[in-house]
Amino acid sequence: MASASDAPALEARDLRKSYRLSRTNVYEALRGVSLVVRPGEMAAIIGPSGSGKSTLMNLLSTLDRPTSGKVLVDGTDTSRMGDASLATLRNRKIGIVFQQYNLISRMTCVENVQLPLVAMGVPPLERHKRAKAALESVGLGHRLRNRPAEMSGGEQQRTSIARALVTRPKILLGDEPTGNLDSKTTQGVLQLFHEINEAQGVTTLLITHDMNVARQTRRVIRIRDGLVEADEPNLPLPVTA
Ligand SMILES: Nc1ncnc2c1ncn2[C@@H]1O[C@H](COP(=O)(O)OP(=O)(O)OP(=O)(O)O)[C@@H](O)[C@H]1O
Ligand SMILES: [Mg+2]
């Protein structure tokens, strides 16, 4: 079952996730979600707070495991993989962008971006070169030596996007990647996601609360109460002033 180029970039098969709240009480956050995301697609995941979006993203990114069902990444069934080989697969194929950036505050921008390459065993000089190139690609070539506290929210988020991209992943996942940004900065970060998707063909899945963000992707997956309520192409809406 080698990963074939025609395999979906990501596939969820009947994903369920239960959280044990007490000895007798179990909460089903996902109740059977199936999805196919094709290579090169860009989609938004929307839905009310508590509907299961982050739970779903954590399963798709393989950071967490489902209670039942499976996730296939680039045609590979991850359900039988051990934690170490799963970490390697995630490191090679998936870039993840978090709402809170998750940058390490005592490291410089370029050191943060190098981190995934350390895990891959890339030698220091090559690491620095690739991190610098990734930062240049997000417009931060002039911020290499800054620490996160010395950068704006948008710059920190672009740093975290560079960190997600530096491994040249096939898949980019974002959980509210513009949730902490003002509307102008949101537009810049969103533009960057579009460029990455179009120019590099990176399959991109973004969770968002922001209808303006969702409106700009071709496909919108709507989650409600742990289920896919709708999964549709996004028809262009009239732009209102
Ligand atoms: N570790 C956990 N233990 C217990 N319940 C959890 C846990 N994580 C999530 N839940 C519950 O599962 C449901 C789905 O949570 P999830 O974080 O996926 O929602 P979400 O759609 O991402 O919401 P938001 O838009 O607010 O981020 C919620 O009711 C939440 O309280
Ligand atoms: Mg969430």
Image (tube, rainbow, N blue to C red):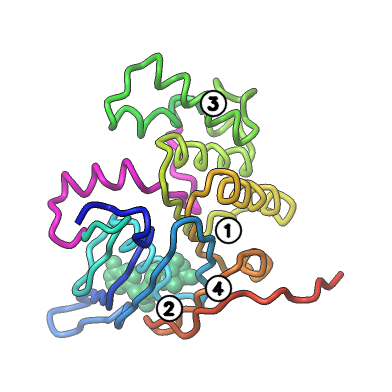
Q: Note whether ligand 1 is within 8 Å of mark 2.
A: yes
Q: Which residues are magenta?
A: 78-105
Q: Earlier in the sequence, mark 3 or mark 1?
A: 3
- Across the whole image, how many numbered discs are drawn on residues? 4
Q: CA distance from mark 2 to mark 3?
A: 38 Å
Q: Position of residue 116 (x, y in %)?
A: 35, 34
* Residue at (50% x, 79% y) in the render: 231
Give the position of the N terminus as an image quadrant: bottom left
Q: CA distance from mark 2 to mark 4?
A: 15 Å
**Which residue was labeled with disc 4?**
220
On the image, numbered disc 1 is attached to which residue?
179
Q: What separation in Å lies between label 4 and label 1 (alpha carbons)? A: 17 Å
Instruction: Identify the residue under disc 2.
Output: 51
User: Dot 4: within a 10 Å radius of its alpha carbon, few (fewer than 14), some, or many (20 or more) residues?
Assistant: many
**Is disc 2 placed on a helix, strand or loop?**
loop
Disc 1 residue lies near ligand 1 with CB under 8 A: no
Question: How far separated are the C-alphas under marks 3 and 4?
Answer: 31 Å
Q: Earlier in the sequence, mark 3 or mark 4?
A: 3
Which residue is situated farthest in the right direction here? Answer: 241
- Mark 2 surroundings: few (<14), some (14-19) or many (≥20) residues within 10 A: some
Which residue is at a point 32% across and 78% down the rendered structure image? Answer: 30
Residue under label 3: 133
N-terminal-most mark, 4 or 1:
1
Q: Amino acid at mark 4?
A: Val
